[in-house]
Amino acid sequence: MEIQNELQVPSHVAIIMDGNGRWARRRGMPRKMGHVEGCKVVEQTVRDAADLGISYLTVYAFSTENWKRSEDEVSALMQLFRIYIKKLLKVATEKNVKVVMIGERSRFAPDLIEGLNELEEKTKDNTRMTFVIAINYGARDEIRRGMTRMAQDVKEGKLEPDSITEQTINGYLDTAGLPDPDLLIRTSGELRLSNFLLWQLAYTELYVTDVLWPDFNKDCLVEAIRSYGKRERRFGGVLK
Ligand code: IPE
Ligand code: IPE
Ligand code: MG
C-alpha cells in the first residue's frame, strides 16, 4: 500500500519480455528452460501489476517472427502456452483480471485456440485489471489484417473513405477499445521495438532494463514505474 501511494502508477504498461534464451545459456541450460522460468515471471507480474493498481498490462509473448525459431523451441513454447492458459485462468479469477489476446490465433493448434477463447470468455466480466497477451502478434500483420477489413467495409459501402479518422483506424486494430500504453518496458537491454504495437506506441514512454526477463520481479517493475513518474510527458512539445 505504501508503495502504491507514493508511486505515480501508469494506467497501461506494456512489456517486451526478452532475454529468456540468454538467461538459460548463462546457466548452461537449453533455451526452453529460460521460457519455463519466463512463464513463472509472467504469472507473478500479473499479480504484481494488479496489486500496484495498473489498469492494463500488455505483454509480448510470441511474435509473428518467432515461428522462424527451431521446431524444438517453438513446440516447447506452444506446450508452455497450454500449461499457462490454465494457470492464468486461476490467477485471473483470483485477482479479478480480464484476459484478452491480441494477434492472429488461427495459426495455433485447435486445442490451444479453444483454451484461449475459453480464457477470454471466462474472464470477460472481471474488472480489476485487463491483461493483454500478444501471441502470434506482429504490428505490421495487425495493421494488414485491420486494413483488409477496412477496405472490405469501404467496398461494401459501410465506410466512407472521407470519414476515416485515427479513431476509425484504432477500431480496426486488435487493440480496439484499449487505451494506448503509457509506459513500455523492454528487458535484456535491446533497443528496438521488434514489430510490437507500432501504431499504439506513438507517444509511449520507453524504459529499457538490462535485467533478463526470468530475473524480472516486482522491484524491477516498481523501478520502471518510478522512472516513468519522474518524466514530464510531452505531446508535440506541450506538457500532457
Ligand atoms: C523472449 O526471450 C521470449 C520470446 C521471444 C518467446 P528470447 O527467447 O528472445 O531470449 P533471447 O533474446 O534469445 O535471450
Ligand atoms: C520480441 O523478442 C518478441 C517477444 C518478446 C515475444 P525477440 O527476442 O523475438 O526480438 P527480436 O525479433 O530478436 O528483435
Ligand atoms: Mg530475444
Image (tube, grey):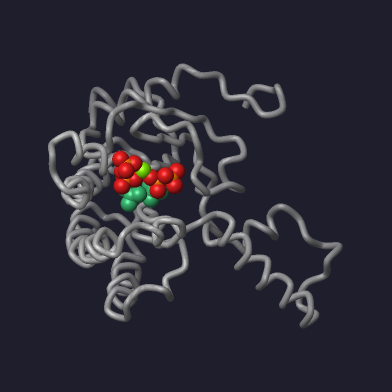
> x and y percent of residue 199 in the render?
61, 48
| Residue 16 image-quadrant placement | top left
Report if residue 180 is visible in the image: yes
* Rendered residue at 60%/68% (across/down): 145
Q: How many marks?
A: 0
Q: As drawn, is 87 to the left or to the right of 126? A: left
Residue that sits furthest to the right in the current view = 162
Residue that sits furthest to the left in the current view = 28
> x and y percent of residue 118 in the render?
30, 74
Q: Quadrant of the C terminus?
A: top right
In-front residue for pair 230/67 = 67
* Rendered residue at 18%/41% (across/down): 24
Relative to 76, residue 215 above or below = above
* Rendered residue at 22%/52% (across/down): 95
Q: Quadrant of the N terminus?
A: top left
| Residue 80 image-quadrant placement | bottom left
> x and y percent of residue 134 in the render?
41, 56
In-front residue for pair 37/66 = 66
In-front residue for pair 181/54 = 181
> x and y percent of residue 139 in the render?
55, 54
Relative to 201, residue 139 above or below = below
* Rendered residue at 63%/56% (across/down): 170
Relative to 118, residue 223 above or below = above
Q: As drawn, is 80 to the left or to the right of 231? A: left
Q: As drawn, is 94 to the left or to the right of 112? A: left
Report if residue 57 is visible in the image: no
Relative to 173, residue 38 above or below = above
Q: As drawn, is 104 to the left or to the right of 224? A: right
